[in-house]
Image: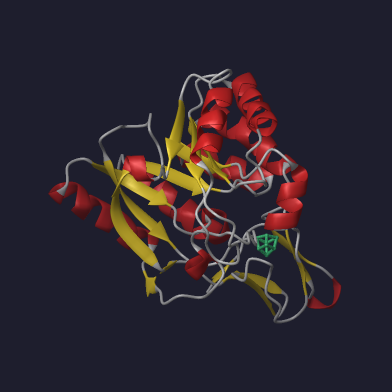
Amino acid sequence: MHEAMYYETKSEGRVVCYLCPHHCRLGEGQLGICQARQNLQGKLYSLNYGQVSSISLDPIEKKPLRRFQPGSSILSVGSFGCNFRCSYCQNWSISQQKPDTRKISPEELVDLAQQYKNSHPDCIGIAYTYSEPVIWYEYVLDSSRAVKQYGLSNVLVTNGYLEKEPLQELLPYIDAINLDIKSYADDFYRQLCGASLSPVLENARLMAEYCHLEVTTLLIPGKNDTAEEIGALAKFLAEIRPDIPLHLTRYFPNYKMDLPPTPRHSMNQALHEARQYLTHVYLGNV
Ligand code: SF4
């Protein structure tokens, strides 16, 4: 266990976590919504610091990043926990359950990345992915600092649901981000993810100031795939920068959602709509 950052102890040992906009207020022994931070005797602890549930060398295009170091590979790591409750989660076995983990310190992670680089010269660094990197923030921050000291790159694949201050502390070490904007409707975020849209949009602007940014939206039939909604999302991104790549990926039934896969014609309509505003739009899972 590792003491968390961004929290305050209140009266009677209660703590408030300020890492993400949920601002969980936790009594003794209670876990946050993310299931990865716990109040123990008036201190907040990160339960997944260095607890790696998945590790693999992946092509950068799998993150997906299409316009950041194309053709490279990246050592990809994830832990457990998530601050969203998406009923259609594609990684639910590590985001909504506690999988087996292996302890890897930030220093050991950098050593591993260097070993991979020796055997695979196209390996550029570390991607924090598979589960939500915000939820092991302290580990991602420590590892990212160490990674930069060795001249390697850091990539985040994130839902972007964290407070501005911790994001600003992390961004100087991050080279590229794939931000998952789940919908351009706040109702979608509230009903299907248990979160809200505006912090994600504000963070998108901030991320684009610091590093290479690409965006992914999983299109779910009847939930977020209308031409109007895709157009509004693409317009928002174009106002930040029209060359932000947008990945529109096709939904398949998973976890608690059993709607049929997104029809091909909806994917093509979304592609056409987004291209009215953005230079680089890609379809995924098709
Ligand atoms: S990071 Fe976890 S504990 Fe902290 S506010 Fe978000 S959900 Fe709650």
Please provide percent x and percent y for residue 65.
40, 37
Which residue sits at x=33%, y=41%?
60
Look at 68% across and 67% down and name the residue there: 33
Residue placed at 50% from the left, 20% from the top?
Answer: 243
Whether residue 138 is situated above or below residue 65 in the rendered picture: below
Q: How many marks?
A: 0
Image quarter for residue 107?
bottom left
Between 135 and 158, the one nearer to me in the picture: 158
Residue 175 visible, this orientation: no
> Is 237 situated left or right of 9 in this image?
left
The percent position of residue 23, horizontal first and vertical second, equals 76, 59
Give the camera-side residue of 212 and 87: 87
Q: Residue furthest left?
A: 119
Is 49 left, or right, of 226 in this rendering? left
Whether residue 29 sits left or right of residue 14 in the image: it is: left
* Residue at 72% from the left image edge and 43% from the top image edge: 197
Residue 81 visible? The answer is: yes
| Quadrant in which ligand 1 is drawn | bottom right
